[in-house]
Image: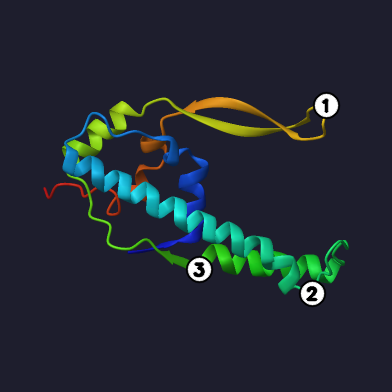
Amino acid sequence: MEILNSTIIRLVNSGILNTTEHDVPAEDAYKSYKFRKALEKAFKEIAEKDKELPKTAGVEEGKEPTKEQEKKIIELREALYNDKSDLGNIIPLSWASYHSLANENKKVAVQLPINEKDENGNPKFVTQFIDVFRACEDLLDGVLFKAPED
């Protein structure tokens, strides 16, 4: 199953990798686990490609990009985000299992960056709790779960 890289980034940033599968049948728990592992792998590959964008745009290591190179990096990043990654054979959960999974994960902890730095100059983060499956339901429909036919 192929999925847009921008969708993978949105799902990961929403905290889907921090979810658990305790309240669903074992078969569906494994499907959800397999989905998370495929997302994690794809996200790492996207991040690696993203790191290479300045080099691809002609920026020398240790140098600041020119305005033209910055434009090229933005174009390359847009193309990367609009590209797709293959998650393998993802089998959707039943509607009932998806709702059990969503109910179990109503408050997933997500670290969000804030515009402050700590004493070492590293970015500061704040923990927020997100109902990830409700927030991303439109992205997961037909991927992680299949809605019942009317």
49 sits to left or right of 142: right
Spatial separation of the CA atoms under disc 2 and disc 1: 34 Å
User: For residue 57, which quarter of the picture?
Assistant: bottom right
x 75%, y 70%: residue: 55
Question: Where residue 32 sits: x, y (%)?
Answer: 29, 44
Spatial separation of the CA atoms under disc 3 and disc 2: 21 Å
> SS for tag 1?
loop
Rendered view: 88 above or below 101? below
Q: Which one is in front, 148 or 52?
A: 52
Which residue is label 2 attached to? Answer: 58
**Residue count near mark 3 (Cα–Cα under 10 Å), binned few <14, some 14–19, many ≥20:** some
Amino acid tagged 2: Gly
Disc 3 and disc 1 in contact, CB within 8 angstroms: no
Amino acid tagged 3: Asp
> In the image, which disc is placed on residue 83?
3
Rendered view: 29 above or below 59? above
Disc 2 and disc 1 in contact, CB within 8 angstroms: no
Which residue is label 1 attached to? Answer: 119
